[in-house]
Amino acid sequence: MHLLSAGYTSSLLLVALLSQVTSLEPIIGQYGEMLKIPCNSGAIKAEDIAITKWKYDKGDGVPGYLLVKQKNQNVSISATDEYKVRVSMDKNSSLLISAAKLSDQRTFTCMVVTDGDVFEYPVNVLIHKLPAKLEISDKAQELEIGRLTKLGKCVAKDANPPANITWFKNNKPLEADGKGISIKASVVPDSNTGLSTTTSTLEYSAMKEDTGAKFECRADGLPLESSSVNFTITYSTENIMLEVSPQKELKEGDNLTLKCVADGNPAPTSFNFHLKGELVTVENTDTYTIANVSRDATGEYKCSLIDDTSMEATRNITVTYLDINLSPSGNIVKRAGEALNLSLQIDSSGKAEVSWTKNNAKLDKQPDFTKLGYSDSGHYEWTVTVGHITRTASFDLTVEGPAVIKNLFKNRSSDGQHKVLTCEAEGSPKPAVSWSINGTVLGESPFVNGKITHKIKVVPSANLTVHCTVTNRLGIDSRAINVSSSVIEEVRMDKQDQSEDSDQTRLVVGVIVGLLIATLVIGLAYWVYSKKSKQGSWKTGEKECGSSEEEKKLEEKVEENSQKAEV
């Protein structure tokens, strides 16, 4: 009876067990860490649980019992294998397994017995492990353009699941194309730990644009990437260029540096320089310097590879130069009215820009010295520019001439109390001015362009003649002016038309004209008288005699006036 009851009870429990098994709930544990597997996730209250039992699937449906706990009793370890020292249970009935490893990847089942019911909660366990690190090994020393070369291997060690590796160039993923990119991957598990090591090998055909490119590898879906690496890209020289320093303008006297630049990598270190027909070979350098170049260095220059002279570069180089010659120069002394002939010679490598200054003031054009005047005196500078070269030449011109009075005049002062005498003169060196009378000097103008003006004031008590005299080492000149005691009179006298001489001339002409008129009047009177006398001569002889005497006197008077008029 008890056996039957026991069998019946077991059948009921089995039926209940099959009916209460929940679906698998996979969890992921980290390799080497404590693995915690929950039992029923709180579906059954702890006070309702009579028995909690943990087991695992050994394979082929064979269970392995780990531990059991009855209500109000301690946990009892049932395991007899390596789990015996690794398993425990927490207060929530969760199974704890220390130092998780890949062999723990199996199904663990929590069996819960309550009053009248039996429940099972199977849990599928997965163990993950990140690779220790990603690193690129077996790196190539250099990459050659157009040649498929093993760039390196990216290794992800001791991972689970095995890492999937992707290669990147400048942060862009690379994909195998069967031509310039080949990627081969392999996964090898460790026989002891079961962890896998993934190796990805990249073969790459470089291009010139890959110079300086950065390569790296990354584990897909994982926060892991290798440090970036770059490679030397080698290729043959395809182009060559000749550089010149200075770049903007090469002046006579500068140092000329030639540099031969080839685009090969590694770049050539020895070159041929063709210096206007002369061949110079340099080794372990790509430059050649010509010191203190002259204008004869203008011409064609070349550089070429030593091992391939057909690959060359050419530059035409112009040396800028400028020579000027100004004649005469220095200190030049000329007389007023003379001509100064300048000889200006320019020898340059290009069109020259010319400018003139006089006393540091810019002139609009080249000065004309056909007929020199005093105003032409000064310091002249001739500036010539070609490119960045500037040359200057200069001379100091002094125009000289004897002292000459240009104007001499008088006028009344503003207060009407005295007369102002003004003497205007020119000449160079500066004329000295003197007067024949003492007067108050009103002032002397600055000596500019060979001209000077001197003024004095006088108060004449009588009519007098005043002389102005100007002198320099080249000559002397003197002029006179009449000054009356009347302050109302105004007279002007200059070199071309002196007022006093003009007055005297007008006086003489007036006298002569007056005498001629008087003579004509007397002659006319005489003619009338003579006519009347002839008409009355037949009356009396006495009257005729008297008339002759009067006629004789009249003729003498006319002759006298005529002589005065001639004088």
Image: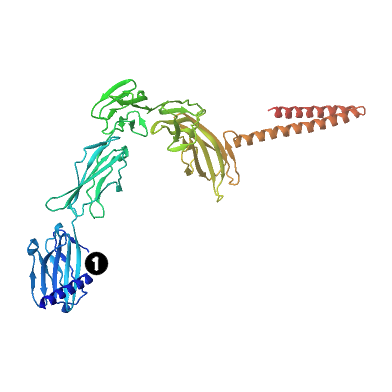
354 vs 250, nearest the viewer: 250
Visible residue check, residue 355: yes
Name the residue tied to disc 1: 23
Q: Is residue 299 above or below residue 436?
A: above
Instruction: Determine which quarter of the picture holds residue 109.
Output: bottom left
In the image: residue 207, left or right of residue 545: left
Q: Which residue is drawn at 58% across and 42% down?
A: 484
The extreme right residue here reads 539
In the image: residue 333, left or right of residue 422: left
218 vs 182, nearest the viewer: 182
Q: Is residue 34 above or below residue 134?
A: below
Secondary element at image label 1: loop
In the image: residue 465, left or right of residue 323: right
Q: Give the class, few, some or many, for how many residues have Cα within 10 Å of label 1's Cα (few <14, many ≥20).
A: few
Which amino acid type is marked by label 1?
Answer: Ser
Q: Where is residue 30 in the image (x, y as percent from the top left)?
A: 17, 60
